[in-house]
Amino acid sequence: MPPERPGKMTTKLTEALIAATKKPASGRIELSDTLRKGLRFRMTSTGAATWLYQKTIKGGVRRGFTLGAYPSMSLKDARAEALVIELEADRGIDRVLVAEEAATKAAEVAAAMRTTGDILAMYISMHIDRNLKPGQSRTERQTQLRTYLKPFSSRNISSVKRSELQKIVDAKAAEGKVVMANRLRSALCAFFAWAHARGHIETNPAETLQRAGKETSRRRTPTLEEVAQMWQASFDQGDLWGPFFRLCILTGQRSRKDVLEMEWKWVNFEKSRYEIPVPKNGLPHIAHLCAEAISELRALKERQTPASPFVFSTTGETAASGVTKAKQRFDAAINEIRGKKKQKPIEHWVLHDLRRSQATALAEAGFDEGVVDRIQNHVAGGSRASAVAGVYNKAEKLPERARALDAWASMVLGRWGQVVQITDARAV
């Protein structure tokens, strides 16, 4: 019989022998039982003691089992457990294989019980919250998916059909909201593509969703007369929404991200400007504040209670919300002014159209297109300076932009004709 390897010994195990076994200085000690063949007692240099058992499954492979830790499991208990495994193995029962099959089945059951709501919650936390910038777009995407997938929230995600998703898109288009329907389609496609890539569904029901229709870029450009009516109507909109609408008109900046979410730390009263740190295109942007805009901001700051880091706030902690309802009231006030002049109700417009009105009026007044683009923080495109030129040409043209925005304020307030006459007289 060959000698035992260092740290290993075959003997009839007893409780006294096990109790007397000391941990080795390094490595491990293994004592194999002659009474229950395949049973081993192992102790490592850390003092961890474990019962192990090896047995060949009838018609199968040789398996190793960890029975338990000593002294929680005694020698008697270890032999008893080894006997049970031996009897199972002799009948061809493989505990390891049984456990693997049970785990697979449990995973399949769990997957079958996974609802659309479960996967949507994962998508929001693992993708939207991580990859979309905080702000309106991220919030809208979350709200959009939660709202339109609510009927499926308790259903298995694999049961969602393409036809059901197409009905959601088509229903929104039927309301005359083609652009919104296409955005909704994009949100659904992104969600189900993510779920498919992650293995939550075998097939992607949104893969072939049809667009609601062709989008056309907005061409609504409120006239200077309409903008003047908006200015007049804004003074009936209260101490928060009135200044908000007026600053949208005066600055020409994006209404929600750049105006409604404006913070006091952005505003420099001495230099008559405010700097938007992260606008839509991600490039910090300086916006000139004409005298009327400065006056609006000073008045807002004086009466703001409670004090807030945000210019427009009702809670003191967050930027104001409720633009949609405020805009509806604003439209009603505008139409009241138009009604007194026996004019038709104002054609549908959105706050973003004010930027087009400003750009058009300034261009018609002879201001350089590059200056107007910088005012509105546009990126290069079309007939504008190339993207490469934009990298090398860092001229901000701040004085020119200030003059243009002062001129725009004069147009809105009806003073532009006087300014032109004075300028012409000086030229003579």
Image: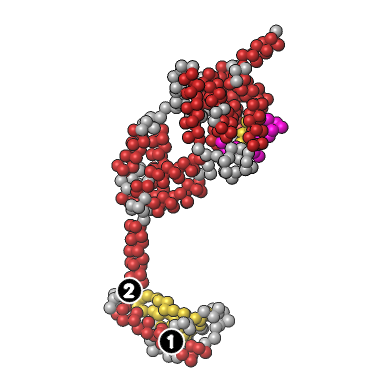
Task: Count numbered badges in the picture.
Answer: 2
The residue at the point 31 percent across, 78 percent down is: 89
Foreground tag (1 vs 2): 1
Nearer to us in this view, 393 or 148: 148
- Work out whether residue 198 or residue 290 is closer to the camera in this orientation and state it: 290
Q: Is residue 107 left or right of residue 254?
A: left
105 vs 217, left or right, is: left
The image quarter in which residue 99 lies: bottom left
Query: Taking the image as drawn, is residue 242 in sight?
Result: yes
Q: CA distance from mark 1 to mark 2?
A: 23 Å
Coloration mode:
secondary structure
Q: Which residue is mark 1?
A: 75
Left or right of 21? Residue 199 is left
In the picture, the quarter occupied by the N terminus is: bottom left
* Residue range corresponding to the magenta coloring: 260-274
| Camera-nearest residue between 354 and 284 | 354
Q: Quadrant of the C terminus?
A: top right
In the rendered image, the vertical position of residue 100 relative to residue 234, given as above or below: below
Residue visible at 36% across and 33% down in the picture: 175
Which numbered marker is on residue 94? 2
Residue 202 in sight in this render: no
Does dot 1 land on a helix, a strand or a loop? helix
Magenta stretch containing residue 362, yes or no?
no
Q: Where 391 falls versus 337 (above or below)?
A: below
Of the residues shown, which amino acid type is indicated by label 2? Asp
Query: Seen from this angle, which residue lies furthest top?
Result: 428
* Amino acid at pointer 1: Leu
Please tell me which of labels 1 and 2 falls first in the chain.
1
Q: Position of residue 118 (x, y in %)?
A: 40, 53
Q: Residue at x 35, y 52 (%)?
A: 154
Q: Secondary structure at mark 2?
A: loop
Q: Position of residue 299 (x, y in %)?
A: 65, 33
